[in-house]
Amino acid sequence: MTEKFDLPYLNNNHIKNNILELFEFVEDEFGSVVSESSSLKEKYFDSINKLQSTKVPYSSKGISINFYDEYLQNELLDLKMIDKEDLIDNQHIYSEEEQEEIENRIQKALSLIKLLHKDLYELIETLVGSFLILKKKNFGGGSVSNILGMIWLNPQKNWSVIDCAEAIYHEFIHQSIFLDDMVNSIFPDANACAEDDALVTSTILKRKRPLDRSYHAAGVSLGVMHLYYMLHDKKGAYQHFDDFKTTIEEINQKTQYLDEHGKYILGEFNKYIEDPDYETITSLLKIKVTV
C-alpha cells in the first residue's frame, strides 16, 4: 500500500537505517569489536555503549529482564529517575514470587505484540537490551535519553497483559525517537524546549510540559492508539486523538524549537490528524523488501 503519512520513528526501514548510520559513525570514530556480519542489535549496542556512559547489558537472544542490577539502579539514581528513599530496606526489589508473576506477564505481553505485529516485535527486540524491573510507588517506569537500550518497568498489580504490552510499546517509541533525534536532530536545543514560551500541552499528561517531552508524548500516543486498533478496540484506538490534536496545534505555533527533521515529522502528524488511518502505521512498521 501507499502510506498516507510517514512516521520515521515507526518506519521499519528508517529505524534500521538510523542504526546503521550510527554504527558507521561510531566505527569511524572509535573502531568496532563487532563485524559487518553481526546482527543489527549487536551493531546498535556496540555503538550506543561506546557513546553513552551507561553500558547497557543485552543479549542477542531476546530482551534481558533484570529484577536487580545495582549498576543500572545507581545510574537511575544519578539521573534522579529514582530517589534514595526508594531503596531503603530493599523495598524496590520484588519478592521471588512477584518476580515470577511479573516476568510471566511481560513475556505474555511480548508474545501478544509478536502475534499482532511480528515486525514491530522484532524492532522492539532490536532497540531494547534490558528491562530493569524496579518498584517505585505510583510509577510505571520510564526511559531516558542518557541510557538508550534500557527500559525501566514497574508493572502495577492491576496491569493486565494488554497494559504491559501498552507500556512496552510506549517505551519503545521513546527509545526510537531518542535514536532518531540523535541521528537526524529533531530538537536542536533541548534546554530551549523547557523555556516558558516553549511549554506545550502534553497529549498523555494533559498539562503544560517542555516542548520536546510533549512532542515525545504525541508520538507515543499514536503507537498506543495503534495497539488498540490492532486489538479491534475502537474506543482505545481514538482515546488520545483530541488531546493529540491539541498538542500538535500548539507545536505548529512553535516550530522555531524544531530542526528540519522535527518539522518534517510535525507535518506528518498533521497529515495523520486529517486522516487517522492505522493501517498506514501497520504498513510503516513492516519490513519493506526492495526488488
Image: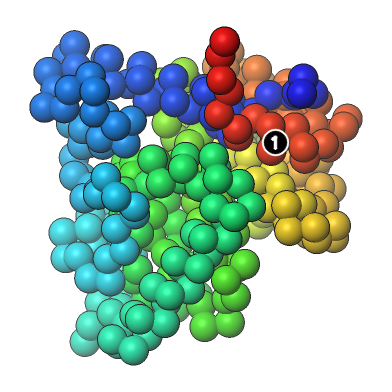
In the rendered structure, the answer to whether residue 46 lies left or right of residue 290 reads: left
Q: Quadrant of the C terminus?
A: top right
For this view, does 208 lie left or right of residue 119? Answer: right
The image quarter in which residue 42 lies: top left
Q: Residue at x 49, y 51 (%)?
A: 171
* Location of residue 155 in the rendering, given as x and y in whole percent from the top left corner: 48, 73
Question: Splitting the image into 4 quarters, where does residue 16 fall?
Answer: top left
Name the amino acid, label 1. Ile
Q: Looking at the picture, how far across and down is residue 114, in whole percent?
A: 54, 53
Vertical relation: 156 (above or below) 42: below
Residue placed at 73% from the left, 52% from the top?
230
Q: Residue at coordinates 65% horizontally, 17% vertically from top-left? A: 264
Indicate the quadrant where residue 220 lies: top right
Whether residue 183 is visible = yes
**Badge 1 density bin: few <14, some 14–19, many ≥20, Cα 10 Å:** many
Q: Which residue is mark 1?
A: 281
